[in-house]
Image (tube, grey):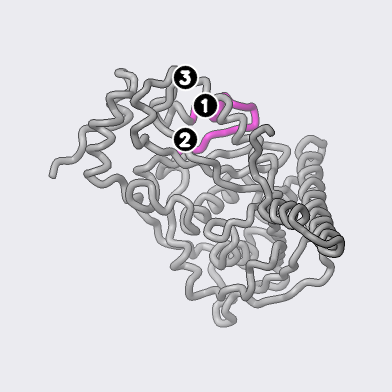
Amino acid sequence: MNPRDDVCKTCEDFRDTISMARSEDDKLDATASYHQHVLSARAEREVYQQCVQESTALFRGSSQDHSKVHCTFDFSQYVKLPHHAREKGPTFFIQPRKVQMFGFRIDGYRQYNYLIDEDQTIGVDGQLAHGPDSVISMLDHAFGTFCHQGGDCTIHADNCFGQNKNRYVIAYLSWRTMTNRHDNIKYMMQLPGHTRCLIDAGFGRIKQRYRREDVDTLQHVADVVDLSSCSNVSVVYGRDTWKWRQWKAFFGDRYKKVPNISKYHYFRFTSTDPGAVFMKMSAVDTEETRFVVCKTNLLAMDSCDIPQEIMPAGLNRERQRYLYSQVRPLVRLQFQEEFCAVPAQE
């Protein structure tokens, strides 16, 4: 069998149940459940494909109305520094410098790939790179820089609770409609294990190019992203691009938790009903559940009120010494100073 990725655990469990079933009734029950699961995944996939087709037709057509777009965001597996096409043996045994990659795709137009080095994350030594503060900070920059303000927006993301499906992301999308940044937002997730989408294809192009290149610095990674595809664009962290902000603290006392959030895969926000979220277990369901996620005494919000900035924590001295003594010698000589400077003194 060829290697496969994104294998659905539920599908595999049904396959095992069918193969291990003893009686015909058990086999029929397991097969019926498996069949229903596949139909549900297919229905969610059709909704995603329809959204992509509409967004692609919008950008490729003659219409100048770009207010209705479809976006996808996700994290890719990190890339390491240094990386050489002719890999040196000791590189396999070291703890390389890690560069996180967060993708924000506007279907039919561009995929913006945010690159975050170890010393640029909220936490020390590359920690807290995938938390709500990080995700919402990059989302807010992407919406404000690459998307038209106002209008409607449809978003797809995976079902990861720590990154995409939590009270803070829900609060952020509600906040956007309450501050007139968007009129209507639909936020959807496909079934876990069936979440392959075009943003993964963009990441795949980057990895194909990355494997053939010599990469020693963050700028080299950005060059790989830009050359991997005409639709891939690199966005490197800096104070002139985006800033980390305290979104969790900002939303913590203004918004409530959504009860039983794990069973819902569809969320809708509208400026005509500020502070409320309309939820469905599936995008193809007809009945919505309304829940007021914003506390009633805070419905009137100032659109200019944004969270405070968070400065990157950087690298501790031990990690600096390790990169300087163990990793830097494997970097090409002309790029060693840019890769890692002399560690700070005790």
**Alpha carbon of mark 3 to alpha carbon of mark 1: how far?**
9 Å
- Numbered range of the magenta stretch: 222-236
Q: Is residue 263 above or below residue 90?
A: below
Give, as a three-letter code, the residue at label 1: Tyr
Q: Secondary structure at mark 1?
A: helix
Q: Is 248 contained in the magenta span?
A: no
Q: Is residue 65 above or below residue 275?
A: above
Q: Quadrant of the C terminus?
A: top left
Q: Can you see residue 284?
A: no
**Alpha carbon of mark 2 to alpha carbon of mark 1: how far?**
9 Å
Q: Quadrant of the N terminus?
A: top right
Give, as a three-letter code, the residue at label 3: Ala
Q: Position of residue 151 (x, y in %)?
A: 72, 55
Quarter of the image for residue 273 reads bottom right
Q: Which mark is residue 210?
A: 1
Quarter of the image for residue 296 reads bottom right
Front residue of 264 and 114: 264
Q: Which mark is residue 85?
A: 3
Q: Which mark is residue 235?
A: none
- At 57% across and 60% down in the image, what residue appears? 161
- Location of mark 2 (residue): 79
Quarter of the image for residue 232 reads top right
Q: Position of residue 121 (x, y in %)?
A: 39, 48
Q: Is residue 217 above or below residue 68?
A: above
Disc 3 or disc 1, which is closer to the eye? 3
